[in-house]
Image (cartoon, rainbow, N blue to C red):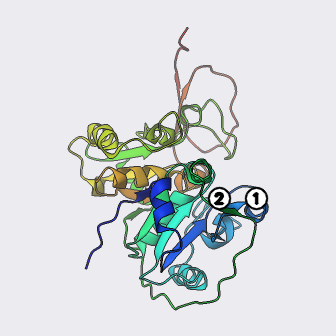
């Protein structure tokens, strides 16, 4: 039986569920000091999971899968089992970046193995603290594990070949959720070259949130994404970011809106930009950019608004 559950949970609702049977709270905050931050302060009862080592299998060659390629399905099954998660578990995920790094990625991965009772905490640890959720510095010990049987990723994934084939096809949409400055090619703080996939449109994931860092209402998100999608079906829509992490934030928002989840291009810009693919940059200037021949760089000069 399919369970109808919102992908987003509010802090007050979590308070009423706290200590319920089968409830597992997971801190998926990412960053240099994420584990240390967890050890210093986390939601009471929460366990920690690491993006780089448990939610990705990073290759030495980032041109294969980008910076955060998905782990092998059997390895992710082991991770889920070792966390004490079973098909009947109710998983609440949070981070300290409004769900973008990396709650939404873990949500997508759990949904993609068929787990139904999984939600992301709206506003993350900050919102939970505002609502007086108990805070702890105790590292939780997982005493009970259960084999979680997983066979394949069930949500749709796009590979680099498909992205290249359809990115400029009017019957498909490729969405880049990175900040406008990275999309336009003005800055690139992480990857080798700035710009975007030719034909991709920019819909920053930050626009899923209001001024308080909370998700917009399902109605507002539905209105927003239906306008973007038009008559294009979800199977012809591909969402990407820098490495398949913040793209999941937009997929989460789309699911929250009650719409079908489009495809995720996991490799995203970090893979595309390392594979000698065409790159488009909407520049506000024509200052020199790194030379990456034989890569094709298409530069469009735009005027800064006064």
Which of 86 and 280 lies nearest the eye of the viewer?
Answer: 86
Which of 188 and 247 lies nearest the eye of the viewer?
Answer: 247
* Residue 123 x, y percent position in the rendering: 54, 48
Left or right: 255 as drawn, with respect to 64: left
User: What secondary structure is found at the residue carrying circle 1?
Assistant: helix
Give the label, 1 or 2, closer to the camera.
Answer: 1
Which quadrant: the N terminus? bottom left
Circle 2 crowding by C-alpha within 10 Å: few under 14, some 14–19, many from 20: many
State how far apart marks 1 and 2 are (Cα): 9 Å
* Residue 122 x, y percent position in the rendering: 49, 51
Residue underneath mark 2: 29
At a point 28% along the width and 53% down the height, the residue shown is: 259
Which of 253 and 158 lies nearest the eye of the viewer?
Answer: 253
Residue underneath mark 1: 37
Q: How many marks?
A: 2
Which of 163 and 23 lies nearest the eye of the viewer?
Answer: 23
- Asked if the residue under mark 2 is in contact with the one under mark 1, i.e. CB atoms within 8 Å, the reply is yes
* Residue 234 x, y percent position in the rendering: 28, 54
């Amino acid at each position: 039986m399919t369970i109808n559950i919102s992908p987003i949970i509010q802090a007050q609702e979590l308070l009423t569920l706290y200590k319920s049977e089968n409830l597992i709270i997971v801190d998926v905050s990412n960053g240099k000091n994420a584990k240390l931050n967890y050890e210093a302060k986390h939601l009471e009862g929460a366990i920690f999971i690491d993006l780089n080592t448990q939610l990705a299998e990073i290759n030495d060659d980032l041109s294969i899968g980008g910076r955060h390629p998905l782990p092998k399905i059997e390895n992710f099954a082991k991770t889920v089992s070792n966390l004490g998660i079973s098909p009947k578990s109710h998983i609440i995920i949070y981070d300290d970046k409004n769900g973008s790094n990396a709650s939404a990625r873990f949500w997508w991965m759990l949904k993609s193995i068929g787990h139904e009772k999984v939600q992301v905490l709206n506003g993350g640890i900050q919102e939970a603290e505002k609502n007086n959720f108990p805070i702890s510095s105790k590292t939780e010990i997982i005493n009970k594990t259960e084999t979680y049987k997983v066979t394949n990723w069930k949500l749709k994934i796009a590979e680099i070949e498909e992205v290249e084939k359809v990115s400029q096809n009017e019957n498909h949409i490729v969405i880049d959720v990175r900040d406008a400055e990275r999309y336009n090619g003005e800055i690139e703080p992480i990857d080798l070259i700035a710009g975007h996939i030719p034909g991709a449109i920019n819909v920053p994931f930050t626009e899923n949130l209001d001024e308080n860092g909370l998700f917009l209402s399902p109605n507002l998100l539905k209105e927003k994404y239906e306008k973007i999608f038009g008559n294009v079906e979800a199977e012809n829509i591909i969402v990407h970011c820098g490495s398949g992490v913040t793209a999941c934030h937009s997929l989460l928002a789309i699911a929250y809106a009650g719409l079908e989840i489009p495809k995720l291009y996991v490799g995203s810009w970090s893979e595309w930009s390392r594979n000698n693919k065409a790159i488009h940059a909407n520049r506000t200037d024509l200052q020199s950019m790194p030379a990456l021949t034989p890569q094709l760089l298409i530069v469009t000069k735009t005027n800064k608004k006064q």
